[in-house]
Amino acid sequence: MVITRATEYAIRTVVFLAQQPKDEIVLKKDICRTQDVTPAFLTKILQPLIKAGIVSSQRGVGGGFLLAKDPSEITLLDIFQAEEGQLKLNYCLLDSEACHRDNYCSVHEVWHEAQDKMIRVLTKYNITELVRREKENLKNSN
Amino acid sequence: MVITRATEYAIRTVVFLAQQPKDEIVLKKDICRTQDVTPAFLTKILQPLIKAGIVSSQRGVGGGFLLAKDPSEITLLDIFQAEEGQLKLNYCLLDSEACHRDNYCSVHEVWHEAQDKMIRVLTKYNITELVRREKENLKNSN
DNA sequence: ATTCCGTTGCTCGTGTGATAACCACGTTGT
DNA sequence: ACAACGTGGTTATCACACGAGCAACGGAAT
Ligand code: SF4
Ligand code: SF4
């Protein structure tokens, strides 16, 4: 019951990209340096983000990565699901075949409610908002 | 990001015990039969519940398991934490040494909020309530 | 002696976190 | 054109931890 390091790094990466000037192409090694991820691992992490249409990439000299869409249209849930697949707290929540008790089980309903609440929080703030709040946090700490 | 089978079975077990007449001692094999768990695995699962003071056990002839306290005082979070330890969605949420960014990171706050919401749901209903709702669900489906 | 639970150790498979080798593509200098 | 170089892309592999489950033996109660 904990998010993977891949998801954590993916979020850091997207937030970092969103902090750059719009359409600025960022080198992999710059992401690595600033976000404390190794290049090899970041390579792996970026692919799902690209496939999910969150990040796009450019090969060759002057290549690198940049956001594929406006950060205000990206949520933490998008990044999470790109890395870990559909969010589910228990198997019975997605596959109705998973447990024959699900039509009367009251625990099922509680997991469902918990999951809904969680998804709501993860979609509540987009990346633009998170960047704004981070900047504000830094300003206040000075 | 999914609860373990151990937690799932532990919850089933506690709910089952709560459905029995008060202070009725239940055999391990009866729990297994009704809740679809193997005895060997259930043995392992029950120990944390006993250590957490949720279930108590009786050895010897006529022995078995029963709830150690009133089901109205047991929440799903209690059972979860007995099996999986402290609930945390990301490492930075419990250990403040885990990430040096935590004093300004806005994502940290979001995880915190998501976790709080989840904990609130898992403590909202006690086992007595869950048993009542399950009985009601069964009645309505007939 | 019997019938229970408790403890311990083990297996086996899968997932996580990470590395590296090699491939494919774009850019640039000639 | 084209070759060299600088990027990211793909794939295979690794060590390790964890999840899920099994079994053997030990210990308490009756
Ligand atoms: S018993 Fe309830 S909570 Fe558990 S898997 Fe079945 S439906 Fe889901
Ligand atoms: S970057 Fe933020 S969310 Fe990620 S571990 Fe650090 S404090 Fe937590």
Image: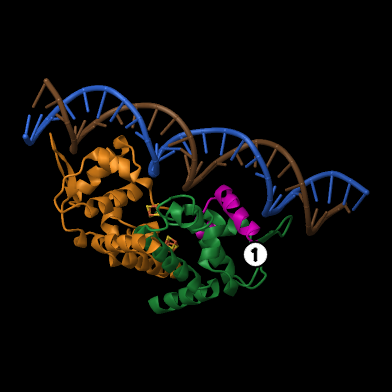
Chain colours: A green, B orange, C brown, D blue
Q: Quadrant of ligand 2?
A: bottom left
Using the image as rendered, state which of residue A115 and residue B63 is in the foreground. B63
Pointer 1 chain:
A
- In the image, is residue C4 above or below residue D9? above
| Residue at x-position 46% and y-position 57% | A93
Amino acid at pointer 1: Leu
- Magenta: main secondary structure: helix
Does A10 lie within the magenta span?
no
| Residue at x-position 19% and y-position 61% | B73
- In the image, is residue C16 above or below residue B118? above
Q: In the image, which residues are magenta?
A: A32-55
Please indicate whether residue A47 sits to the left or right of residue B86 in the image. Answer: right
Dot 1 lies on which element?
Answer: strand
Q: Is residue B1 visible?
A: no
- Quarter of the N terminus of chain A within the rendering: bottom left
Using the image as rendered, state which of residue A24 and residue A97 is in the foreground. A97
Q: Position of residue B131 (x, y in %)?
A: 28, 59
Label 1 neighbourhood size at 10 Å, few (<14), some (14-19), many (20+)?
many
Residue located beneath label 1 in the image: A66
Does A34 lie within the magenta span?
yes
Could you say which quadrant of the image residue B133 lies in? bottom left
Please indicate whether residue A74 sits to the left or right of residue C27 in the image. Answer: left
